[in-house]
Amino acid sequence: MTATGTRRLSRRRLLAIALGGAAAAAAGVTGAELISRGILPGKAVLDDLDGACSVPGPVLAYGPPGPSFSGTFYSAARNRAVGYTLAYPPHHRAGDELPLVIMLHGYGGNHADALVGMSPRQAVALRIGGRPLPPVAMVTADGGDGYWNPHPGDDPVAMVIGELIPLCQRLGLGRGPRRIGAMGISMGGYGALLLAEKYPHIIAAVAAISPAIWTSYAQARDANAGAYASAAAFAAGDAVTHAAALADSPAHLPVRVASGYDDPFYPGVQALARALPAGAVVDFSKGCHTDSFFLEQEPASLAFLAGHLVR
């Protein structure tokens, strides 16, 4: 507050008012705040002008891609056919025994577009700092739009644990202790954390990019009414409340979480970071909930998982 009681407007708020036109002008500073939160139109343009979403694009290099297979299986847990893609790293093929990364897609996605800017076979062929990624296989699968938590007649978590992982293990992938990692972006980032918290004896490491974390059921319901079936379902799947389970895993489960300062989920990820066990890697940096931020974080997240899974 100034001496006269007038609030000083930041450059971002002034830009928001200008972009919001009549809607923001009528609402004043409140309208500007609504644009900043993405409720009124103009946030993408505002972020571009403000520079909040500007992140350096990574220089991506790949080794020779290994084989990749896509197919479907009937999921009793989801009561429908589920598509999946399975990719092998360079110089490996079907039948090889390898650690496994389960990559969970974001809202509106499916097994074919779980990653940003690369396919699963490219992801496991990444060369980081001139060196190949330690050899891991990757699997993606259709999880629907229910935020990777159980809904009536549709349980994607049970599908991953009871159907997808056994399918991969029959092929030699993810066998043995501490050989399966979980990774995801946005809704998938939350899902990866949920898998690790619920099944720390199965998931050996987790990497979440811009996870969609809400801190209350009311907040989640207002943003996406289909994210949780009920308040009880939110409580059962609250990644912040259940973060202590990561410390109770057999080997103090390794965790990596990344979020941009201007991501709408940033406050929730901050709450999660405070609840994570000591030693968790938390990367807060410039960026928004955008493909450019997701792509920037994918190589580091994959390297983190591969480093913990390959022994």
Image: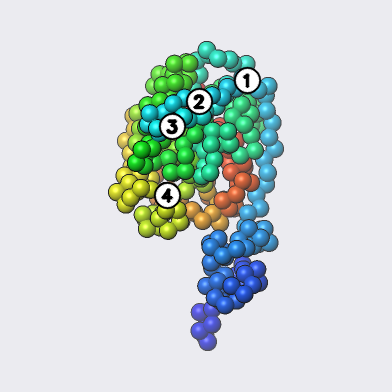
Q: Quadrant of residue 122?
A: top right
Q: Give the number of the mark in front: 4 or 3.
A: 3
Q: Residue furthest left?
A: 232
Q: Of marks 4 and 2, which one's residue comes earlier in the chain?
A: 2
Q: Give the number of the mark in front: 2 or 1.
A: 2
Q: Work out how far the residue at label 4 is from the one at label 3, CA to CA, in angstroms.
A: 18 Å
Q: Work out how far the residue at label 2 is from the one at label 1, CA to CA, in angstroms.
A: 20 Å
Residue 99 in the image: state x and y as whole percent.
49, 22
Residue 73 in the image: state x and y as whole percent.
47, 24
Q: Which mark is residue 80?
A: 3
Packing grade of label 3 (10 A; few <14, some 14-19, many >=20) is few
Q: Work out how far the residue at label 3 is from the one at label 1, CA to CA, in angstroms.
A: 29 Å
Secondary structure found at label 1: loop
Question: Could you say which is closer to the camera, residue 147 or residue 9?
Answer: 147
243, above or below 178, in the image: below
Badge 4 amino acid: Gly
Q: Of marks 4 and 1, which one's residue comes earlier in the chain?
A: 1
Q: Which residue is tagged 2? A: 72
Q: Of marks 3 and 1, which one's residue comes earlier in the chain?
A: 1
Residue 214 in the image: state x and y as whole percent.
42, 53
Badge 3 amino acid: Arg
Secondary structure found at label 2: strand
Residue drawn at the location 57% of the way across and 70% of the way down: 32
Q: Work out how far the residue at label 4 is from the one at label 1, CA to CA, in angstroms.
A: 37 Å
Q: Work out how far the residue at label 2 is from the one at label 3, CA to CA, in angstroms.
A: 10 Å
Badge 2 amino acid: Thr
Badge 1 amino acid: Gly
Q: Of marks 4 and 3, which one's residue comes earlier in the chain?
A: 3
